[in-house]
Image (tube, grey):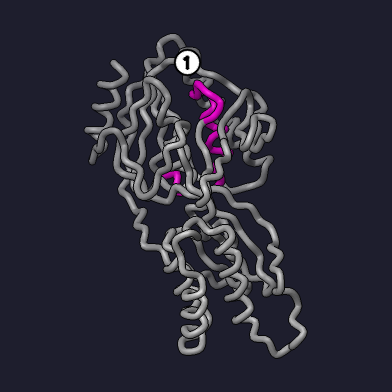
């Protein structure tokens, strides 16, 4: 089976776990159709946990899915389900390796060239991260070290490049940006009922719920010399998921300017649910909000839209004050 993470380029928070379905255990009648059972299961879990669960007519959707399955097959029934969810992130991964998704998001961008950036402006390039906890610690530590070696009395300011961060695990990205934060709570996960779960960075680790619930720990953390230094955050159309969360984590930082192009618009949390047939439903379950609990959906807008690299570099140097 293909890796769920590899397919879900925009996955922000992936929690793997089996789901228990009341009444959906091993059927007494062996003639029960596994596809029909899977349809019942995805309806049940989405009705309980889906991002848009309060706006969907679940009985009508179930009926439609069963009708589509009878006429056009199981895969088309799942596509009907995903279109009804309308979140652009949920998808269905078959045990045979096939993945079914219905996203209308276009996240292709041309990128920016930072080759002409002034030498006295620090530059931290971020990328999407997928890997083990140990690899996450190394990843975040490497970014702290990059800040450490570039920092000094002559450093005028910083560029944080999120333009190609198109998903992955949120916590290594947040931990990587630890040198620049001025507060602990950086954002919130908020579900359809408004339940809030804080996340952020404290001392040496990205956390969720509280600073004691550490997710990615940095072995040798660093904080920039000038805590109030000017920071320019660059985003682009490929910026999605964890990249969008990283933008929101810096959105309310003082002396921070966000420039570039609008993001992809996939700033929500996904979780993974294993069904009784061993297929996997990856389901969008929570919105992402900034530190002031403002919820964002759709493309995230920069403070200033800039279309080409030359204009971008000129604006960076103007803002930072070279």
Mark 1 neighbour density, 10 Å: few (under 14) some (14–19) many (20 or more)? few
Q: Is residue 322 visible?
A: no
Work out whether 110 lies above or below 223: below
Q: Quadrant of the C terminus?
A: top left
Residue drawn at 31 percent across, 44 percent down: 262
Q: Position of residue 290 (x, y in %)?
A: 45, 35
Work out whether 300 lies above or below 55: above
Q: Is residue 305 visible?
A: yes
Work out whether 18 lies above or below 308: below
Residue 244 forms part of the magenta stretch = no
Residue 170 forms part of the magenta stretch = yes
> Which span of residues is magenta-colored?
164-185
Work out whether 119 lies above or below 130: above
Q: Position of residue 156 (x, y in %)?
A: 37, 15
Q: Position of residue 162 (x, y in %)?
A: 42, 38
Q: Residue furthest top?
A: 153
Classify residue 82 as left or right of residue 272.
Answer: left
Q: Quadrant of the N terminus?
A: bottom right
Residue drawn at 43 percent across, 68 percent down: 84
Q: Position of residue 268 (x, y in %)?
A: 48, 49
Q: Determine which quarter of the picture holds residue 321.
A: top left
Residue drawn at 53 percent across, 20 percent down: 148
Name the residue that disc number 1 marks: 227
Secondary structure at badge 1 equals loop
Count of numbered circles in the view: 1
């Amino acid at each position: 089976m293909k890796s769920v993470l590899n397919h879900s380029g925009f996955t922000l928070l992936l929690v793997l776990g089996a789901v228990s379905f009341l009444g959906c255990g091993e059927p007494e009648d062996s003639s029960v159709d596994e596809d029909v059972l899977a349809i019942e299961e995805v309806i049940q879990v989405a009705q309980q946990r889906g991002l848009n669960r309060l706006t969907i007519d679940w009985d009508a959707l179930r009926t439609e899915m069963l009708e589509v399955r009878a006429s056009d097959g199981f895969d088309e029934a799942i596509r009907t389900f995903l279109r009804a969810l309308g979140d652009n992130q949920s998808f269905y991964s078959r045990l045979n390796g096939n993945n079914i998704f219905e996203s209308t998001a276009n996240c292709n961008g041309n990128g920016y060239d930072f080759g002409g950036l002034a030498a006295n402006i620090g530059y931290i390039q971020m990328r999407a991260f997928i890997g083990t906890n140990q690899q996450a610690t190394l990843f975040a530590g490497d970014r702290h070290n990059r800040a450490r070696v570039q920092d000094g009395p002559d450093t005028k300011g910083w560029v944080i490049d999120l333009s190609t961060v198109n998903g992955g695990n949120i916590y290594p990205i947040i931990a990587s940006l630890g040198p620049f934060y001025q507060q602990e709570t950086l954002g919130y996960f908020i579900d359809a009922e408004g339940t809030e779960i804080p996340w952020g960075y404290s001392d040496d680790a990205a956390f969720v719920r509280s600073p004691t619930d550490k997710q990615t720990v940095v072995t040798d953390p660093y904080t920039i010399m000038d805590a109030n230094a000017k920071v320019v955050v660059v985003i682009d159309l490929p910026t999605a998921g964890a990249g969008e969360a990283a933008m929101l984590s810096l959105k309310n930082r003082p002396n921070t300017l966000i420039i570039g192009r609008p993001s992809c618009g996939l700033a929500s949390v996904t979780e993974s649910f294993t069904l009784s047939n061993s297929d996997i439903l990856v389901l969008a379950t929570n919105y992402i909000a900034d530190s002031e609990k403002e919820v964002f959906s759709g493309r995230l807008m920069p403070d200033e839209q800039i279309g080409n690299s030359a204009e971008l570099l000129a604006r960076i140097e103007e803002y930072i004050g070279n």
